[in-house]
Amino acid sequence: MADTTDTAGTADTADTADTADTKNGTGSTPQAAGISRRRLIGTAGATGVALGAVGAGAGYAAASSNSPEQQATLTSIGADEVMFHGKHQPGITTAMQARGHLVAFDLAAGAGRKEAAALLRRWSATAERLMAGEPSASDDTDVARDAGPSSLTVTFGFGHSFFSRTGLQKQRPAALDPLPDFYSDHLDKARSNGDLWVQIGANDSLVAFHALRAIQKDAGSTARLRWQMNGFNRSPGATAHPMTVRNLMGQVDGTGNPKPADADFNKRVFVPGSGSSSGSDSGSAQSPAWMGGGSYVVVRRIRMLLDDWEKLSTTAQEHVIGRKKSSGAPLTGGKETTEPDLEKTDANGDLVIPLNAHARITRPDQNGGSALLRRPFSYHDGFDEDGTPDAGLLFICWQADPLRGFVPVQRKLDRGDALSKFIRHEASGLFAVPGGAEKGGYVGQALLEG
């Protein structure tokens, strides 16, 4: 798999959460209000995702009642707002949210380019309103009436099949060619791919569900639901200090993620403004101009075989991963962000970090520099008849070119990752996510009207 521990998490929030000040609904900083500053602002400055006080969202919540309590300005995480418009779509560099929904749609029979453009226009308008804490334009369900924006983001992408359905085959990026088969794949085609993909994230479950229903209703007769997956993460402020998230195996997950402050971050994650390849090598896939400022996302439902994993001792688990379970530090010593010593041996002459340890195999310097921005959600979909948990990771990774990002890393994992026997890839999708919409425009406009 492409990294469920050292590389399958979000950007290290301990490094990014306090890089800027954001005002809450009261106009004071979070410290003054006595609340956590672990917000989604960590990556905004380097990537063009603008944040602001809630504004209209607070008014929507206050307008729901005349009671003094509900007229009070929102505070805490409910007041956090992510801007819909920008160079890049929201939900890529936005800090990890507590709740997520992933949805794929197929265009209905007879729906083509014109209908798809109208749908993306509706979806974009709805996303802009909901992300500002406002109700949808018509037939709002009132599910989120008492809440603010709560860091809501809505992100849109196009699958390989979308281009033939809309007569836009000549505009389909080469980077969107189907992923190769991998040894660890046990894929359910009904829960894979799709014409259109939507990612919803928020720090409040009702806000996230409200957006999910609005997007589904906006699809109308133009598109039908193909599959939907629900995920979660730790809520902001649940820990004593900002820290990297843990997955359902209990591992600190996401230490090796690239940071927006890295000199090559944009080159690794986003397609250049021209839409051409972000890499200098001749083997890099070319992207059309409409993909400028966009990114490619690989989405995988990775089931964790938790009953087998939990039978291992903590020491055995640490040797599978190559890091301490308690802190995420490499087995060779230091803290979470300490560079591992891959050559260090123990008293018996054995490598301290085994050759097949997940953290070793997934390192960029072990994969020709391939690096992914991982932004997953955990999931739990109940239990099988024998009591086995259906739980794991909704793996989401972003890159400027999947042929130089996800594919080489996953191929190497296929050849000998110690973690492979404890996971199973059950669904997969690859989507082209265009750049952000300009004010007054909609996501994908350059493709659908170009």
Image: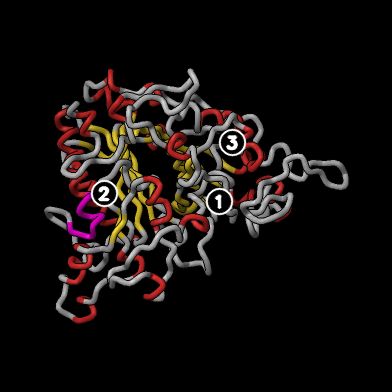
Which residue in the structure is indicated by mark 2? Answer: 84
Q: Nearer the viewer, residue 354 or 295?
A: 295
Q: CA distance from mark 3 to mark 2?
A: 32 Å
Q: Which residues are magenta?
A: 127-135
At x 20% / y 76%, what residue is drawn? 71
Tell which tag, 1 or 3, sits nearer the viewer: 3
Question: What residue is shown at x 13% (from left), y 55% (from top)?
Answer: 139
Q: Amino acid at mark 2?
A: Phe
Could you tell whether 228 is left or right of 325 in the image?
left
N-terminal of the pair, mark 1 or mark 3, is 1
In the rendered structure, find residue 175 and report the number of the disc placed on it.
Answer: none
Quarter of the rendering occupied by the N terminus: top right
Residues 132 and 212: in front is 132
Label for residue 364? Answer: 3
Q: CA distance from mark 1 to mark 2?
A: 28 Å
Q: Are the residues flagged by discs 1 and 3 in contact, CB closer than 8 Å?
A: no
Q: Residue 253, percent across and down?
A: 55, 51
- The disc at residue 253 is 1
Q: Residues within 10 Å of mark 1 (few under 14, many from 20)?
A: many
User: Residue at 28% across / 22% down in the picture?
Assistant: 171
Residue 219: x and y in percent read: 20, 42
Give, as a three-letter code, the residue at label 1. Answer: Asp
Q: Is residue 215 visible?
A: yes
Identify the residue at the far front of this view: 263
What is the secondary structure assignment of the residue under circle 3? helix
Give neighbour class at mark 3: few <14, some 14-19, many 20+ (Cα, 10 Å): some
Give the quarter of the image for residue 157. Answer: top left
Instruction: Locate residue 190, reporting x and y percent.
Output: 37, 34
Q: Earlier in the sequence, mark 1 or mark 2?
A: 2
